[in-house]
Image (cartoon, rainbow, N blue to C red):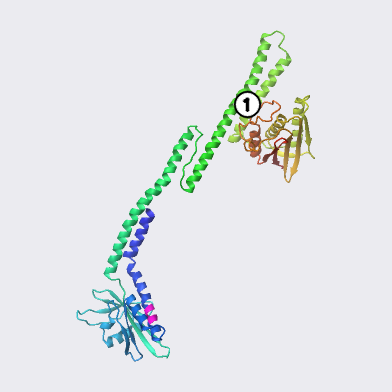
Amino acid sequence: MAFLVALMVALWLMQVVFFNALYRQVKRREVMQVAVVMENVINDIYPVQHLVSVVAEKEVCIMVFDADMNQVQSLDGPGNCVIHKMSHDEQVEAIQRVLGDHTRQFLEYEQEEDQTYRLVTRSASSEFRIFKESGAPQIILYAKEIKDKNGDKYTILINAQDEPVEAIITTTRTVLSLVSIFSLVFAWFLILIMARSISDPIEEINEKAKVLAEGKYDIDFDAKGYKEINELSDTMTYAANELSHLEKLRQEFIANVSHDLRTPLTMIGGYAEVMRDIPGENSAENAQVIIDETKRLSNMVSDVLNLSKIQSGAEKPDLARYNLTESIKFIIQNVSELLKGEGYSIKFDYSGDIEVVADKTLIDQCFYNLLTNAISYSSENKTVIVKQRVIDDSVRIEVTDFGKGISQNDIPYIWERYYKNKAGRVKNIKSTGLGLSIVKTFITVHGGEYGVNSVEGKGSTFWFKIKIE
């Protein structure tokens, strides 16, 4: 509407302020075109009938004089013709003044009503002169000297009205008024239609978003409208699906954590009651069970706390240079000792020691999680292969198992918090489902990369890569 109002204002300014100036420019070009037609008629290029039609169309009158200033041709148009009311001497004087180097001169011509024609200004071309009749429209005289094909000299004198007649102005303003009223009314209805087509789907999305905020995720944002509305609707539907999936994972996480925490607490409470109530059971073995379960419980809680601190930015990595290869050897040795007698074989393939600048605790946690994950999902082939490879300025740690692998549908979700793939697990190593999410978070804060290559039925290779500094 603002654009339309601005357009109407511009049109009215053109009509009220600039209309006369624009009319003069158009009229002057028409006069020059008539002169060209007259020249072509004199040279027998155009027929006289063509000149007559042009004079009538352009509403001008025209006179042609020979070298001795004798009139040889005359055409009177439908407009207000001044030159045909002049005497021959006045016509010659007008030509001389038009073609001469005079400025702000006066040309008087007596008529029945004693009307006076006055030269008021001069155009950029010396061929233009503008006359004013008291109480009448402004008049333009145009004179041009030409030669025909035989070399004979002629002078063309053209008279045209240089101001639009009142009827033209009135008609134009009336038409513009009607067009303005129609345009404003039409624009108003168009605005209402467009506003509804835009606001209705937005209001629908807004209402469904409120339902989504209440925790109801089974919503389909199917609002239809412009391209941007459709994209917003699809994005909101995608967000609702992802929130629904995340909510399921959160519920599973709570169930897993509740179960995993209950187990060590039950063990601690049971052994403590036995040691208290049964004589002779207050032994070092029972005390060690309580200590081991306490450590396992503490590790579970630490996983959750460390992950939350790192993701929230409350805790930054404590960077220091250390021997990554030796740290991996130590973890492999400890895990192998815990699995002694169960038939597991952990092989470490490396070409030399590598030092990195990183948070040793966080990187060790990442490797430990990948290693225990590989052991958990190993099948009858209880071999786990750990590789250390140097790629350009980075070191890549790979952990490969030969279990059942991971479904391609599950791979996009395995790095998410709370996710816990139960398919393929063969060893019951307690887990909160945060292992791979911890790897993702800890490696990301180090500016590293992580990933997995897996084939169902053949096993998986998890890896992470950090820079060597």
Q: Position of residue 226 (x, y in %)?
A: 46, 48
* Placement of the C terminus among the 4 image quadrants: top right
Q: Residue furthest top?
A: 279
Asked if one can make out residue 270 in the rendered structure from this viewpoint, the answer is yes
Part of the protein shown in magenta:
32-37
At mark 1, the secondary structure is helix
Q: Please, what is the three-letter code of the amino acid marked with disc 1?
A: Val
Does 180 appear above or below 209?
Answer: below
Q: Is residue 88 left or right of residue 379?
A: left
Decide which of 449, 344 is in the foreground and name it.
Answer: 344
Asked if one can make out residue 101 in the rendered structure from this viewpoint, the answer is no
Q: Position of residue 464 (x, y in %)?
A: 69, 39
Q: Position of residue 200 (x, y in %)?
A: 42, 43
Q: Give the residue drawn at x 40%, y 49%.
A: 194
Q: Give the residue drawn at x 25%, y 74%.
A: 136
Which residue position holds label 1? 301
Quarter location, residue 344? top right
Quarter location, residue 170? bottom left
Counting labels gives 1
Most common secondary structure along the magenta stretch: helix
Q: Give the residue drawn at x 38%, y 86%.
A: 42
Q: Give the residue drawn at x 46%, y 37%.
A: 208
Q: Position of residue 127 (x, y in %)?
A: 37, 81
